Image (cartoon, rainbow, N blue to C red):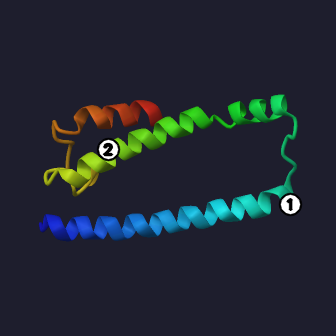
């Protein structure tokens, strides 16, 4: 396995994923207000934000980032979870992600 080649592929696919997320986010900002009405009052907006579980979403994103950056930097883990159990270098991060996601 060529680590540099794997890392280039990861950067390329990460860039494509970022573009997809940006397109979906832009579409959501432009189209969702036409489909549904969002709260205007501050208290209603805060309640809406809490209901959407933004904090949990951010924690899952942090956990995914920790595991993905650990896999990116580790030759033993760059193949992903399908190649075997995580190395000790990322085992705690994987456990954190599993606890956050499930």
Does label 2 or label 1 sit earlier along the sequence?
Answer: 1
Horizontal arrangement in the rendering, residue 100 relative to residue 10 (left or right): right
Label 1, residues with CA under 10 Å away: few <14, some 14-19, many ≥20: few
Examine the image and state in which quarter residue 26 appears: bottom right
- Tell me, yes or no, whether the two marked residues, 2 and 1, touch with CB atoms within 8 Å: no
The image shows residue 53 at horizontal and vertical percentages of 63, 34
- Is residue 102 visible to the viewer in this orientation of the structure? no
Examine the image and state in which quarter residue 31 appears: bottom right
The numbered dot on residue 34 is 1
Residue 47 higher or lower than 2, as above or below: above
* Numbered marks: total: 2
Horizontal arrangement in the rendering, residue 95 relative to residue 36 (left or right): left
User: Which residue sits at x=38%, y=46%?
Assistant: 65
Residue 87 higher or lower than 47, as above or below: below
The numbered dot on residue 90 is none
The image shows residue 57 at horizontal and vertical percentages of 55, 39
The image shows residue 20 at horizontal and vertical percentages of 54, 67
Residue 91 higher or lower than 9, as above or below: above
Residue 65 or 101: which is nearer the viewer? 65
User: Which residue sits at x=87%, y=35%?
Assistant: 41
| SS category of the residue bearing label 1 | helix
The numbered dot on residue 67 is 2
- Is residue 65 visible to the viewer in this orientation of the structure? yes
**What is the spatial separation of the Cα atoms under label 2 and label 1, in whole angstroms?**
37 Å
Label 2, residues with CA under 10 Å away: few <14, some 14-19, many ≥20: many
The image shows residue 49 at horizontal and vertical percentages of 71, 35
| SS category of the residue bearing label 2 | helix
User: Which residue sits at x=51%, y=68%?
Assistant: 19
Horizontal arrangement in the rendering, residue 38 relative to residue 95 (left or right): right
User: Which residue sits at x=87%, y=40%?
Assistant: 40
Q: Pick the quarter of the image with the N terminus.
A: bottom left
């Amino acid at each position: 396995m060529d680590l540099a080649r794997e890392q280039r592929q990861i950067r390329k696919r990460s860039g494509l994923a970022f573009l997809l997320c940006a397109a979906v986010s832009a579409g959501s900002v432009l189209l969702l207000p036409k489909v549904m009405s969002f709260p205007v009052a501050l208290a209603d907006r805060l309640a809406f934000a809490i209901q959407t579980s933004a904090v949990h979403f951010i924690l899952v994103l942090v956990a995914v980032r920790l595991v993905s950056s650990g896999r990116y930097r580790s030759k033993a883990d760059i193949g992903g979870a399908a190649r075997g159990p995580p190395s000790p270098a990322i085992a705690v991060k994987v456990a954190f992600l599993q606890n956050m996601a499930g």
